[in-house]
Amino acid sequence: MLPVLSRYQCTRLACLAGEGAMVMVWSPRGIIRAGGTAERRANGAMAVTVLVVEDERKLRDLVRSYLERAGFTVLSTGSGAEAITMASGAAPDLVVLDLGLPDVPGETVARELRAVTATPILMLTAKTAEEDRIHGLELGADDYVTKPFSPRELVLRVQAILRRGGPAADQGVTSYGRGELMLDEPRRAATVRGAQAELTPTEWGILVALATVPGRVYSRFELINRVRGYEFEGYERTVDSHVKNLRRKIEDDPASPRIIQTVLGGGYRLGLARDA
């Protein structure tokens, strides 16, 4: 029986992914990958893989070229359905996702990916309205870039997202609220009431920033600069969207949060004390 990776499956016996960057072939034992991330890592290479999902061929090739020059291994596709299958099989380190795809909407692709993985997502969109960008972030994106954009800026944003999800200094495990929240910074892992929370790099960054000094109020402006390292339009709504997603994952009752508390006119604070 063939494995079911997503409701959107390749219907061909062979699925050419990323214009020759990778081939996935169905077999009775599952999927055989040629040139995929897992194989490269098994051979000892530490190349970071980015999946670019963009239906405009020229733009897709341009983004791919800039990312490869920056040292990334790049897979690419113009199909949302193929992107879901590729992400399941190749396990990329980050996905650059256009929202205006011709077959499966980018929002649906994002929801599919978020249902099974915390892989960082950088969204590309031609929609400039703030509400559209906020909606994308609420779907779980770590960042967004509006078209037209500078390919060099996109590379910098990809690098910034990956730095947030990269190895941390060996600071050990810190406990808050009598063990209700545990932050393992070396492993970038958050455990809430005994269960590990699957956080995106941005969600992790916000939680760690708030936990630096429990009880201290961090403004939205301060949080976005601590987490992302740069300023951009609409930062207040952006932080609110990420906090909303974070509360869904770590609060018993997101409508009445105890861990991440809102301070009217101020920002946010961690509501749990650090354990001795």
Image (cartoon, grey):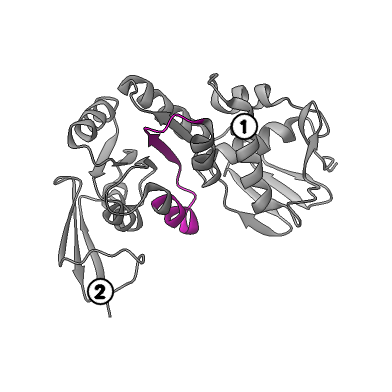
* Residue at (56% x, 37% y) in the render: 202
Q: Where in the figure is residue 74, as x and y percent of width and height?
A: 26, 39
- Pick the front one: 131 or 271: 131
> Looking at the image, which residue sits at the far bottom?
1
Query: Considering depth in this image, is 235 or 175 the residue closer to the camera?
Result: 235
Q: Is residue 185 visible?
A: no
Q: Position of residue 263 (x, y in %)?
A: 81, 32
Looking at the figure, which quarter contains the N terminus? bottom left
Residue name at image x 23 percent, y 45 percent: 78
Alpha carbon separation for disc pair 2 and 1? 46 Å
Side (left or right) of 92 relative to 137: left
Along the viewing direction, whichever of 253 and 4 lies nearer the viewer: 253
Amino acid type at circle 2 is Arg
For the record, the magenta segment spans: 109-129
Circle on res. 29? 2
Residue found at x 61% / y 46% = 245
Q: Is residue 124 magenta?
A: yes
